[in-house]
Image (spheres, helix red, strand yellow):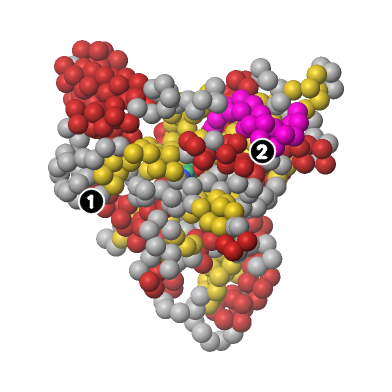
Amino acid sequence: MAQQEDVFKKIVSHCKEYGFVFPSSDIYDGLGAVYDYGQNGVELKNNIKQYWWQSMVLLHENIVGIDAAIFMHPTTWKASGHVDAFNDPLIDNRDSKKRYRADVLIEDQMAKYEDKIQKEIEKAQKRFGDNFDEAKFRATNERVLENQKKYDDLHHRYQEVMNAEGGIDLEGLKQIILDEGIVCPISGTRNWTDVRQFNLMFKTEMGSTADGASTIYLRPETAQGIFVNYLNVQKTGRMKLPFGIAQIGKAFRNEIVARQFIFRMREFEQMEMQFFIQPGTELDWFQKWKEYRMKWHQNLGFGAENYRFHDHDKLAHYANAATDIEFHMPFGFKEVEGIHSRTNFDLSQHAKYSGKKIEYFDPETNESYTPYVIETSIGVDRMFLSIMCHSYEEQQLPDGQVRTVLHLPAALAPVKLAVFPLTKKDGMPEKAQEIINDLRFHFNCKYEEKDQIGKRYRRMDAIGCPYCVTVDQQTLEDNTVTLRDRDTMEQKRVPISELRSIIEDKVSITSLLKKLL
Ligand code: GAP
């Protein structure tokens, strides 16, 4: 575990050192849980967004995109339930003065029991090798049974307090924390305050205060911008059910427990798609979208074992199915995307609060109804983090050296090709520039002439550049260059005229998209 934490720390520093992610307002020592993307980060982020957008809008004839404003009419958030219910249950430790989410403290405690079980299983697996029968071991091993019971009891109690009539039972939550003996990680004490609800929306004012400014919110999700535009898009696009509306944009949440770098931020970006369907078909569509979204993730080649679904026990009152796609981060399996069957809750609420009829006339059944919705909602920043975590490697080389390399999927890499003149003379820089001038229209290229070639390779490995080309004396004679592969470090001699055809297909988003069909 400690080793994994070290790796994570290294990834965070790597992100800063190589221009991927900086703390916001760094010269003023940063701003809590707010980050800026640097020169390489923004390219990677844009490529992630492009991969998502094109997989939704380009590959689906019945999905269109929009770009709604961040500020919305304040009644939007009353209708969506965010004003009344977008809360986190918080608890303070009186000794450390630190504030925590009570539900997260309990979920962490459940994860500890799961970890203990997992460790027993791994130990036994090593001992028994191929003869190991996990199901039997789980059913008979005393320590596993003991921890499983603790987990089940806690899980049951937790469900009860989270789903209590009239909302979360705050006293019940505190009682669990006390009964489980959960201590503050900073002070180590159990000196807890009561649990209180805290709304996560940021407020600001529109208009001058003198003439009666109104309070508005920074949107906590992009989804509502889609719901309030349902009629506009359906009518102007003459869309027929089933159809989807996709959007990428910023969202803001006043997260109290902001941790793990860009995993939980106060300003972040979402890629959301609301798919409008006929009532009664939602569980089929939910299943289809679950499968498609998992395929989208696994298409990046990080290995199926690093993903899992986490079906929700606790459903929001308007949802009739919900699952998370979790990715194996250095700090455990964590949610990257949520897929929710939201019934007709949002559209009905907006119809009620706006007084507008929000319905679909179905020409096939001659009926009007409020469509049901399947939502897929993924955080760009979490996706970014999962890609960084999986790609980062400190690789031991045969000559005893260690190189830090980012094995980014080539289609997402910020720079696709680096071109180096071997020396700064004999027309080599000019030849290198010529190659770049020709290829820059097709993919992102970078020119580098400083330091020895070995150092230049290392710098490119560190930003995940899949290909490097060196222009040398022979190039000037026969127009060939050495092409070096980031992952295998193999070099081969190729004609300049073939560079585009060798590289373009491998580094294009299209190559990823084709594998989705
Ligand atoms: N419209 C549904 C919705 O917003 P959510 O589960 O609250 O659902 C969806 O958020 C996704 O947005 C999450 O799976 C996560 O990737 C991302 N996300 C949510 N809160 C975040 C935060 N504070 N920082 C970074 N990403 C966040």
Q: Is residue 112 left or right of residue 325?
A: left
Residue 455 within the segment the image draws in magenta: no
Residue at 44% over, 43% down: 199
Q: Which mark is residue 227?
A: 2
Work out whether 274 lies above or below 320. Answer: below
Q: Report the magenta residues as a range.
A: 339-359
- Is residue 312 in view from this perspective? yes
Residue at 38% over, 58% down: 32
Q: Amino acid at mark 1?
A: Lys
**Screen quadrant of the N terminus:** top left
Q: Is residue 423 left or right of residue 16?
A: right
Residue at 75% over, 34% down: 356
Which one is in front in this view, the residue at disc 1 or the one at disc 2?
1
Expressed as whole percent of the image width and height from the top left, the position of residue 206 reads: 60, 58
- Is residue 412 in view from this perspective? no
Work out whether 359 lies above or below 300. Answer: above
Question: Which residue, given by chain and number where applicable, does mark 1 sit on?
Answer: 97
Dot 2 crowding, Cα within 10 Å, few <14, some 14–19, many 20+: many
Q: CA distance from mark 1 to mark 2?
A: 40 Å
Work out whether 233 lies above or below 37. Answer: above
* Residue at the far bottom in the pictured view: 425
Q: Amino acid at mark 2?
A: Phe
Q: Earlier in the sequence, mark 1 or mark 2?
A: 1
Looking at this view, is 515 or 9 the one in front? Answer: 9
Residue 346 within the segment the image draws in magenta: yes
Expressed as whole percent of the image width and height from the top left, the position of residue 108 reads: 28, 35
* Picture quadrant of residue 487: bottom left
SS type, badge 1: loop
